[in-house]
Image (cartoon, rainbow, N blue to C red):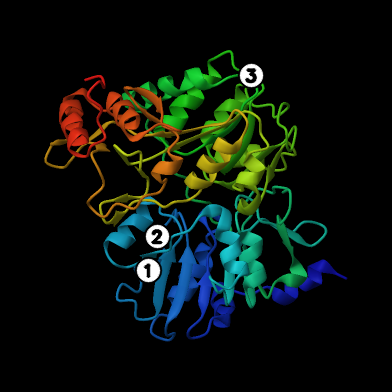
Amino acid sequence: MNIHEEYRKRLRTAEEAVRLVKDGDWVDYSQCVSFPPALDRALAGRKGELRDVKLRGAISMRPVQVVEQDPEQESFTYNVWHCSGLDRKYLDAGRAYFSPMLFRHCGRYYERGDAPVDVAMVTVAPMDSHGYFSYGLTNCAQQELIDAADRVIVEVNPHMPYIVGLEADSIHVTQVDAIVENDEDFVHPAPVRISDIDRKIAANIFPHLQDGITLQLGIGGMPNALGSLIAESDLKDLGMHTELMSDGYLTLYQAGKITNERKELNRGKGIFGICNGSRELYDFLDHNISILSAPMHYINDPAVIRQFANFVSINGCLAVDLYGQVCSETAGLRQISGTGGQLDFVTGAFEAPHGKAFLATASTFTDRQGVLHSNILPHFAGGEVITTPRAQAPWIVTEYGAVSLSGKPAWQRAEAIISVAHPDFREELIHAAEAQRIWRRSNKR
């Protein structure tokens, strides 16, 4: 087989390739950096011609043209698995819709037909000498969505790093219906600002870390602050097993803190499902045989996570109530992010022999009118979505401390949670706990 001839036979302009989309189709753009901008623009150009085309994406890094060019949803309906700031604006405006999911099940939704796919459009790395396109920065559920698709279009981008995976890391040219070339660079997220509160929260988590742990970090100021603390510490021989790899991990690799040599699984290899970060991070990953991508059905599986003796999971949340219920995805009825893998890692870390999961939030937020509000609530009553149920509540961390809720009765939980609330709100939270009958008379005030 002449793979270059096979490539030429399938090479199309973006406008030609999107002719594969028909009325009523489900089109999947994959997630994050795998978003195909040239195909998106070309498909948006068919507004008014197509009818009832449904699309899926997640963590959009650039304006989505099927949304931007079709605000009345005459032709296109856009749906997101997990929100970036841009996706949040689309949801707020009623121009996109949220799809709840657990990350470990994302591939299964495609396999079971719960998330149908007629056309897959994904960005890949250039073809190698054997005819394979690496999925690069997004393994996630890439293979499952492509297997479910009737038609597959790849957008080849030379800026996509070549990354080898544990499995499901590439597609062969003969499995592709159309190829589009696009050399525009990726949109990189703005550097994350680390606040003083981020540093205080990180400092409250740091004492719980030890040599040889396997670490899962979320994204944001606090994980970056913790990464800096670790990089400057005496900790050593850490491992990486994470759904999302960000620049925080690059800091740890550059400081020599991550060796992956004490991992019980995939020894010597860092494992991730999606990567989103700087050009420096992407260059670091290109052809780096010490780091492998893997599907979320593996990375986020509690049965896998539990095999790491000292697994530590650290993620953010938006609010916690006195029962230990955790909201990490909505503010009232407003969708902010998504469930993602939080519950996957909370579950897996608890099942690991010495595992710990930390959910972190600032104790307060200030609204647009300058009024201070507590992120520790008596109970949720505004339509907030519960991401982690109280029965699985792990460690809760604010700038005022870290408390473990596992196994504790309601009065003990309430006391612990109030102890890490902002001091200005503690007395009213105690009164609420008393009214809710979860405050013991001998509790500390």
Question: In the picture shown, does residue 318 fall above or below 231?
Answer: below
The residue labelled by disc 1 is 67
Q: Can residue 180 be seen in this view?
A: no
Residue 78 sits in which quadrant?
bottom left
Q: In what element is the residue under mark 1?
A: helix
Quadrant of residue 147 within the rendered picture = bottom right
Separation of marks 3 and 2 at Cα, in angstroms:
41 Å
Residues marked 2 and 1 touching at CB (< 8 Å): yes
Q: Is residue 350 above or below residue 115?
A: above
Q: Where is residue 400 in the image (x, y as percent from the top left)?
A: 31, 22
In the rendering, which numbered label is found on residue 236? 3
Q: In this view, does 306 lie above or below 64?
A: above
Q: How crowded is mark 1: few (under 14 residues within 10 Å), some or many (20 or more)?
A: many
Tell me if 397 is positioned left or right of 373 in this view. right
Kindly identify the residue that appears in the image at 17 percent across and 41 percent down: 367
Disc 3 vs disc 2: Cβ atoms closer than 8 Å?
no
Please tell me the numbered disc located at residue 42: none
Residue depicted at 48% across the width and 62% down the height = 57
Mark 1 vs mark 3: in front = 3
The kind of residue on which mark 1 rests is Val
Residue at image x 40%, y 49%?
A: 387
